[in-house]
């Protein structure tokens, strides 16, 4: 005998609720704003309203040092900010730097974080004395995977002596670890989590 329709609907709804609760429990482990090093690279905006990247003005504010920052919400949204340097071994004067920002949604299975950015919002800016042009900005939307994710407490922190902080450690799929990031804010400090712009093919950066 087939189960009554109301019973079937209730069972399906209960299944969805249990799945949502399990997802929220996993996501609560990585919820927050995480930043590497001294924390000069950070998602969102600070108390003075200054942001690493302003998506409305499409403007980067260059931090004093390089670093990584990721933010995650319990309901599946992420934001990332990266400022990195690249050196040229053939010409030490020809170093370059890049700033990257994007946000979107993510799924966390307890081991890996799969990040899907909103197309049209993200940006990458490259800078370098030997580049032509020396400063260039383009749209940026690249799916990312934080592999072999671990969260632990660090009791020996160079930047914060005599303190204990939560650490988020992610790896690339080739096994190379990203710089470990410390928990700075919970709940996270982020720009709006919704999609802001639609991608326009061929539009200037």
Image (spheres, rainbow, N blue to C red):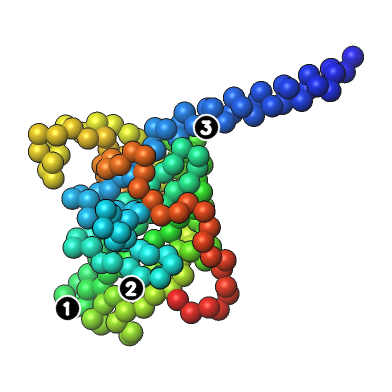
**How packed is label 1: few (under 14 Cα within 10 Å), some, or many (20 or more)?**
few
Q: State how many labels appear.
A: 3
The tag earlier along the polypeptide, 2 or 3, is 3
CA–CA distance in space, label 2 to label 3 = 37 Å
For residue 65, above or below residue 27:
below
The tag earlier along the polypeptide, 1 or 3, is 3
Q: Are marks 1 and 3 in contact (CB under 8 Å)?
A: no
Tell me where residue 74 appears, x and y as whole percent.
Answer: 46, 37
Quadrant of residue 158 within the rendered picture: top left
Query: In the structure shown, which secondary structural element does the residue marked by tag 2 occupy?
Result: strand
Residue visible at 66% across and 23% down in the picture: 14
The tag earlier along the polypeptide, 1 or 2, is 1
**How packed is label 3: few (under 14 Cα within 10 Å), some, or many (20 or more)?**
some
CA–CA distance in space, label 1 to label 3 = 48 Å
Q: Which residue is mark 3?
A: 23
Q: Which residue is mark 2?
A: 126
In the image, 174 versus 34, the foreground residue is 34
Query: In the structure shown, which secondary structural element does the residue marked by tag 3 occupy?
Result: helix
Residue visible at 33% across and 38% down in the picture: 186
Q: Which residue is mark 1?
A: 93
Res 170 seen here: no
Furthest toward the bottom, the residue is 132
Tell me where residue 15 appears, x and y as whole percent.
Answer: 66, 25
For residue 6, above or below residue 69:
above
**Between tags 2 and 3, which lies in front?**
3
Tell me where residue 65 appears, x and y as whole percent.
Answer: 19, 60
Residue visible at 28% across and 31% down in the picture: 152
Furthest toward the top, the residue is 1
Which label is found at residue 119? none
**How packed is label 2: few (under 14 Cα within 10 Å), some, or many (20 or more)?**
some
């Amino acid at each position: 005998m087939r189960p009554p329709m109301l019973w079937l609907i209730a069972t399906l709804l209960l299944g969805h609720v249990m799945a949502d609760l399990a997802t929220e429990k996993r996501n609560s482990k990585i919820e927050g704003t995480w930043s590497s090093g001294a924390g000069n690279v950070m998602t969102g905006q600070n108390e003075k309203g200054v942001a690493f990247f302003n998506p409305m003005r499409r403007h980067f504010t260059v931090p004093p040092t390089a670093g990584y920052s990721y933010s995650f919400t319990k309901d599946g949204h992420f934001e990332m900010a990266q400022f990195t340097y690249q050196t040229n071994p053939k010409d030490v004067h020809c170093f370059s730097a890049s700033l990257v920002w994007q946000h979107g949604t993510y799924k966390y299975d307890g081991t890996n974080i799969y990040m899907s950015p909103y197309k049209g919002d993200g940006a990458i800016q490259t800078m370098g004395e030997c580049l032509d042009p020396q400063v260039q900005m383009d749209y940026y939307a690249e799916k990312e995977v934080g592999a072999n994710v671990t969260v632990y407490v660090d009791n020996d922190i160079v930047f914060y002596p005599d303190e204990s902080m939560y650490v988020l450690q992610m790896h690339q799929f080739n096994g190379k670890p990203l710089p470990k990031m410390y928990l700075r804010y919970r709940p996270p400090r982020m720009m709006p989590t919704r999609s802001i712009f639609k991608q326009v093919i061929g539009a200037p950066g």
